Image: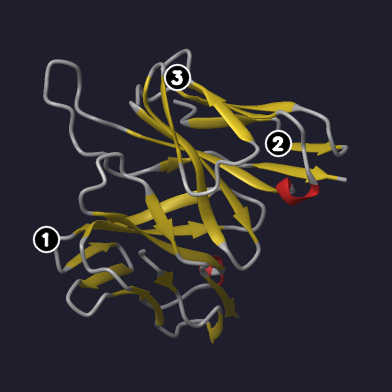
């Protein structure tokens, strides 16, 4: 099991450029999350998904869009990058009960290695 | 709104000393609390998760306690080693939040000196 993987690991963008960050998990988790980490501010939730085809806004969603077309993948898009989006981005996933059981409350979250993004 | 605080922001101890890391939260209506470790330039590794109905959890040299009524959790690391040097983060999930969203503290950076 690779767990949670993220691509790319590093990226430098110019202001106004667009890009997509990819998160993939091989644990059959239902829930996936995108966080950003900035010095002195901890991690803050950008968007999350509670299943294939469903997404919702977190604490700091402005300037980002997401899609979850397949259960194992969660994409984070920046349509027009700004210097304020310079950050380290982390993806996480957590599981629910197996199909056939009542969907359980999300439990432990597993994190990817992060993507370091610089916008100049 | 839930606020999660970790004090101090940085801590340095000599090898062999016990580590005590603090986490406080303003709203006691939590579902669970998770402690993570983060090495420089790396992702987060989950260390311990405590459900709101539990008072403590243990794993090897790690012990985490939870006092919901006072809004506090403490992570104890016994007999610290240089390999324990990292940033330690705590995060809570609010009761009533069905999607398990985590609210993080800013972390405590720990250095264990040989």
As measured in the structure, the alpha-carbon distance from the residue carrying label 2 to the one carrying label 3 is 19 Å
x and y percent of residue A24 in the render?
A: 52, 24
User: Label 2's element?
Assistant: loop
Using the rendered view, name the quadrant where residue A1 is placed. Answer: top left
Indicate the chain on which mark 1 is placed: B
- Please give the label number shown on residue A72: 3
- Please give the label number shown on residue A9: 2
Which quarter of the rendered picture does the C terminus of chain B lie within?
bottom right
User: Is the C-beta separation of discs 2 and 3 under 8 Å?
Assistant: no
Question: Is circle 3 on the same chain as circle 1?
Answer: no
Whether residue A23 appears in this view of the structure is: no
x and y percent of residue A70 in the render?
A: 45, 13
User: Vertically, is B96 above or below A65?
Assistant: below
As measured in the structure, the alpha-carbon distance from the residue carrying label 2 to the one carrying label 1 is 38 Å
- Please give the label number shown on residue B53: 1
x and y percent of residue A39 in the render?
A: 65, 64
State how the image is colored: secondary structure
Q: Residues within 10 Å of mark 3 (few under 14, many from 20)?
A: many
As measured in the structure, the alpha-carbon distance from the residue carrying label 3 to the one carrying label 1 is 32 Å
Which quarter of the rendered picture does the N terminus of chain B lie within?
bottom left
User: Label 1's element?
Assistant: loop
**Point 31% across, 44% down: residue:** B100
Side (left or right) of B68 relative to A28: left
Question: Is circle 2 on the same chain as circle 1?
Answer: no
């Amino acid at each position: 099991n690779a767990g949670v993987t993220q691509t790319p690991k590093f990226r430098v963008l110019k202001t106004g450029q667009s890009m997509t960050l990819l998160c993939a998990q091989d644990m059959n988790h239902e829930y996936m999350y995108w966080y950003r980490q900035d010095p002195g501010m901890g991690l803050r939730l950008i968007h999350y998904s509670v299943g294939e085809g469903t997404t919702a806004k977190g604490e700091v969603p402005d300037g980002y869009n997401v899609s979850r077309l397949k259960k194992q993948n969660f994409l984070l898009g920046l349509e027009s990058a700004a210097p304020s989006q310079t950050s380290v981005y982390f993806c996480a996933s957590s599981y629910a009960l197996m199909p056939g059981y009542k969907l359980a409350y999300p439990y432990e979250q597993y994190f990817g290695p992060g993507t370091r993004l610089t916008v100049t | 709104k839930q606020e999660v605080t970790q004090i101090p922001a940085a801590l340095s101890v000599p090898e062999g000393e016990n580590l005590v890391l603090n986490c406080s939260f303003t709203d006691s209506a939590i579902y669970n609390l998770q402690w993570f470790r983060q090495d420089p330039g790396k992702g987060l590794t989950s260390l311990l998760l405590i459900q709101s109905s539990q008072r403590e959890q243990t794993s090897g040299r790690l012990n985490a306690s939870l006092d919901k009524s006072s809004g506090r959790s403490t992570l104890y690391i016994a007999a610290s080693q240089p390999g324990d040097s990292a940033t330690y983060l705590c995060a809570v999930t609010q009761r009533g939040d069905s999607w398990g969203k985590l609210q993080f503290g800013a972390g405590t950076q720990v250095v264990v000196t040989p």
